[in-house]
């Protein structure tokens, strides 16, 4: 085989489930052809290639997968951050007119061009920190037409080759102007919005925020039922503040993921495990809102796969960088370094239903990071340093972000 590109003299962290643990191939090499991983193995056995990169014995990993973001919005809520720092709670601030409702005005008022430009800025920041696949939820307009507009803007921003963008329709809240007839609003979401989004292929899944102050369990059941009927995958924001029983609903529906889970019962954990639902940990939001840590030990013991995401949003987690979330997951959630890596690679890909990202196995997309360090633990250990630790980020076998140092010969 003559490959397009071989990265040699590398510690290749494959995250391949067919290998043990993180699937590290020490003194390894990876060959890329046609944008795919064509071969991974010992450096001594590497195939010939048109271009060769010498990794100098350093780490090569899959590109990171951020499986939960709200990256399309206008304005910011730094004022709320200051209020929380002074002791007010997220729910208190939301009830007083802040929270998600405070992002609606600026987002609705922003032009398509402005929204796309702001989103692209965030995508660039995520790519520079190693994210090669990113999920982006709608949810900051809340009207039927407005949510479709946000999904169209996500599609427009995602026209570029990197990172790969995955759009999700989020039923975030009942909009303030519809609280008096919320039942009718939920019916419109089910009977009009979801079928239109599915028909226009504007999203691949539907997420619902089922918690105190958001949708009830009955409303979430109706919304996710409509999503399944329209042929879309389902997931949910559940148990961030209160356990309304939505994790059980997600297990029953065979959801891709259950996200947050600060509050979740032992029975629900068992059902998530049986149903193969990914638990998405969002430690940035958890720490910033000073919430209790989710029951990581119980999720681990039950065999629930755990992903880790940024939850990038203007309220609870304004952060594009997954390596920082890996640091919080290891230091604050008690996850191991191995769990942190799987959380931002293979398990995050599972939460998106995307088998060809998140690992470096033959046939996967050649999305990978060339690091300036050797030990996988260095990435969370040197928190805040990701952008300087990363030497190059490849998407589909092409370097889409690189430090000024030349890496190819
Ligand atoms: O995942 N919990 C609901 N949604 C977001 C926060 C959104 C916001 O505050 O703007 C979350 O934390
Ligand atoms: Fe979220």
Image (cartoon, grey):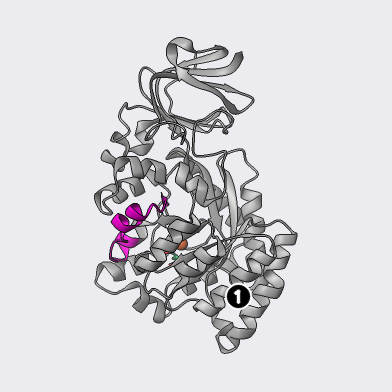
Q: Residues within 10 Å of mark 1 (few under 14, many from 20)?
A: some
Considering the image in quadrants, where does the N terminus appear? Answer: top right
Q: Residue 159, can we see it?
A: yes
In the rendered structure, which segment of residues is drawn in magenta? 286-309
Q: Nearer the viewer, residue 339 or 383?
A: 339
Q: Residue furthest bottom?
A: 180
Q: In the picture, residue 138 is in which quadrant?
A: bottom right
Question: Across the whole image, how many numbered discs are drawn on residues?
Answer: 1
Cβ at disc 1 under 8 Å from ligand 1: no
Is-magenta flag for residue 287? Answer: yes
**Between 265 and 134, the one nearer to me in the picture:** 265
Q: Whole-percent x and y of residue 85?
A: 26, 67
Q: Quadrant of ligand 1?
A: bottom left
Residue visible at 60% across and 75% down?
A: 222
Query: Picture coordinates of residue 332 (x, y %)?
Result: 25, 53
x then y, percent, for residue 311? 43, 57
> Relative to residue 330, is residue 184 depicted above or below?
below
Q: Secondary structure at mark 1?
A: helix
Q: Is residue 86 left or right of residue 45?
A: left
Q: Residue 312, can we see it?
A: no
> Does the magenta run of residues contain 350?
no
Residue at 46% of width from left, 65% of height from top? 237
Q: Percent position (x, y) of residue 83? A: 30, 71
20, above or below 222, in the image: above
Is 315 above or below relative to 351? Answer: below
**Would residue 200 be found to the left or right of residue 283 on screen?**
right
Q: Which residue is mark 1?
A: 222
Q: Residue at x 35, y 33 (%)?
A: 388
């Amino acid at each position: 085989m003559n490959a397009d590109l071989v990265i040699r003299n590398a510690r290749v962290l494959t995250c391949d489930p067919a290998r043990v643990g993180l699937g590290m191939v020490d003194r390894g090499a990876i060959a890329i052809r046609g944008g795919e991983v064509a071969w991974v193995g010992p450096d001594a056995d590497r195939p010939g290639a048109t271009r060769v990169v010498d990794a100098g014995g350093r780490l090569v990993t899959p590109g990171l997968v951020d499986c939960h973001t709200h990256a399309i919005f206008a304005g910011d809520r730094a004022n709320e951050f200051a209020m929380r720092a002074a002791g007010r709670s997220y729910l208190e601030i939301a009830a007083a007119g802040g929270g998600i409702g405070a992002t609606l005005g600026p987002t609705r008022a922003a032009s398509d061009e402005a929204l796309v430009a702001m989103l692209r800025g965030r995508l660039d920041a995520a790519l520079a920190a190693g994210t090669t696949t990113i999920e982006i939820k709608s949810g900051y307009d809340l009207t039927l037409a407005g949510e479709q507009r946000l999904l169209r803007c996500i599609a427009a921003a995602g026209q570029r080759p990197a990172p790969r963008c995955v759009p999700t329709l989020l039923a975030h809240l009942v909009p303030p102007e519809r609280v008096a007839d919320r039942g009718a609003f939920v019916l419109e979401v089910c009977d009009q919005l979801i079928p239109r989004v599915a028909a226009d292929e504007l999203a691949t899944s539907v997420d619902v925020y089922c918690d105190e102050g958001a949708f009830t369990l009955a409303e979430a059941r109706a919304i996710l039922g409509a999503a399944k009927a329209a042929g879309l995958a389902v997931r949910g924001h559940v148990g961030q503040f209160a356990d309304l029983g939505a994790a059980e609903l997600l297990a029953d529906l065979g959801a891709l993921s259950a996200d947050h889970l600060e509050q979740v019962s032992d029975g629900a954990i068992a059902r998530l495990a049986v149903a193969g639902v990914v638990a998405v940990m969002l430690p940035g939001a958890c720490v910033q809102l000073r919430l209790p840590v989710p029951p990581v030990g119980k999720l681990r013991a039950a065999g629930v796969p755990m992903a880790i995401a940024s939850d990038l949003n203007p309220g609870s987690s304004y952060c594009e960088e997954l390596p920082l979330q890996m640091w919080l997951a290891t230091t604050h959630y008690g996850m191991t370094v191995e769990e942190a890596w799987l959380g931002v690679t293979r398990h995050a890909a599972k939460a998106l239903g995307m088998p060809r990202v998140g690992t470096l196995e033959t046939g996967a997309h050649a999305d990978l990071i060339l690091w300036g360090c050797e030990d996988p633990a260095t990435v969370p250990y040197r928190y805040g340093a990701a952008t300087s630790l990363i030497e190059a980020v490849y998407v589909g076998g092409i370097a889409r972000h690189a430090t000024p140092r030349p890496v190819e010969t």
